[in-house]
Image (cartoon, rainbow, N blue to C red):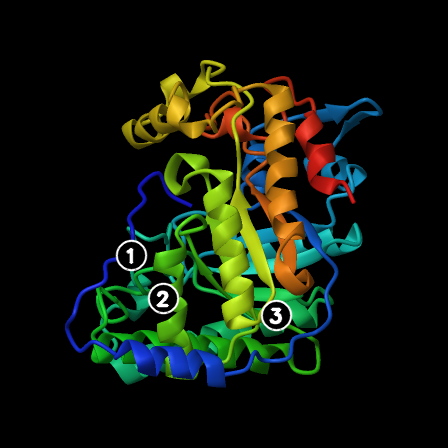
Amino acid sequence: MSARRVSARRVSAGRVPARVLALAVVLTGAIAAPARAFDHGADLSSLPRIEAAGARFHDGQGEADALTLLHRADIDAVRLRLWHTPGDSASALPTVLAMARRAHASGMRLLLDLHFSDTWADPAHQPTPAAWSALDFAALADSTERWARETVADLVAQGTPPAMVQVGNEVDHGMMWERGHIQGDNRDEWSRFTSLLEHAARGVRAGAGTAPVSVMVHVSAGGDSAACRWFFDHLIVSGLRFDAIGVSYYPLWHGGIPALRGNLAMLARRYQRPVYVVETAYPFTLRASGAPAAAGDSTRRFAQQIMGDTRALLPGLDASLESQAIFVRAVRSALADIPLGRGAGLYWWEPAWVSVPGAPSPWENCALFDSTGARLPAARALGAR
């Protein structure tokens, strides 16, 4: 997730002929993945930091931690972001291990979101971990595999194996730039990028051992069928083994529900894999509680894209509690209508990222809790069967 979004750029350097791409897609069958229930999920990566800052949450049954309150709303899966060597404990391995224990104790499935970066990775930013910046490509690929393997093995060892692992976050333009950067159809760029993905996927499977785990590839372009087809056609040609497709969908960047519907259906039909919306959100207000105004410049710029920006709204839907719940049901319906039941999960991005004194949130108006910590009706809509 990032405030800045870019579209896939398709250029002609080293172009793979369209007929070759089409033939490869037809001839390459999907990898068999473990049978899975639909994920009613929440990305709770920032929850430990928000809790440490003093956040309190409640519903009609009283005060409880946010994870418990979301589970009471029948949300049954948790997504956690992991950075390689972050500047603080946020999204660090010990924090992720602790959150995984909490999720498993509540009976919730785990989607691990591996950012091969020390900080945010998204379509506009894919910085290589500092510890790997001087490595040659072979050593970089080996480090990628080893880190994925050791991370998943750590989760398995503590009894909290992930059900699914993303190998990269919003990798529309590759990962670990510049060496894993894709800017068009250049074969050498795609070869390097998919080699990194393959090493990551291999590490995930090795770390899981006998535990069932699915490997997901995640792009941001939830409403852009052309960009997604271009990307995944190339991925299929590469021979990469992956089990599931994840997309992000935010109306501010990705258009309306019809565009989402068309793209999800195309992805399921063409690539014969389960499809997930692993990031989405919608504002219940366009007003801030006041806390973000005290934040740093980057947080203010981010907030200005969400707070008060009517482009974040869908036609006919205002920013209200009712509209937020309607939005959830609309995205869920788009997934339910995917052919052959391949709509496999919906994750709300950072539903507990509320503003608290000393820890302002630029995302508070897209959370599933209000400024008092009360759980909102959209949480029930997200967990609805």
Q: Which residue is mark 1?
A: 8
Where residue 62 is drawn, which disc sits there? none
The residue depicted at 65 percent of the width and 52 percent of the height is: 337
Q: Residue furthest front?
A: 19
Percent x, y for residue 115?
43, 59
Of residues 202 and 144, which is closer to you in this image? 202
Q: Quadrant of residue 311?
A: top left
> Of the residues shown, which amino acid type is indicated by label 3?
Asp
Tell me the quadrant of the picture where the C terminus can be found: top right
Q: Which residue is mark 3?
A: 154
Q: Secondary structure at mark 2?
A: helix
Disc with the residue nearer the chain's start (2 vs 3): 3
The residue depicted at 64 percent of the width and 79 percent of the height is: 32
Where residue 231 is drawn, which disc sits there? 2
Any part of residue 309 in sight: yes
Of residues 273 and 138, which is closer to you in this image? 273
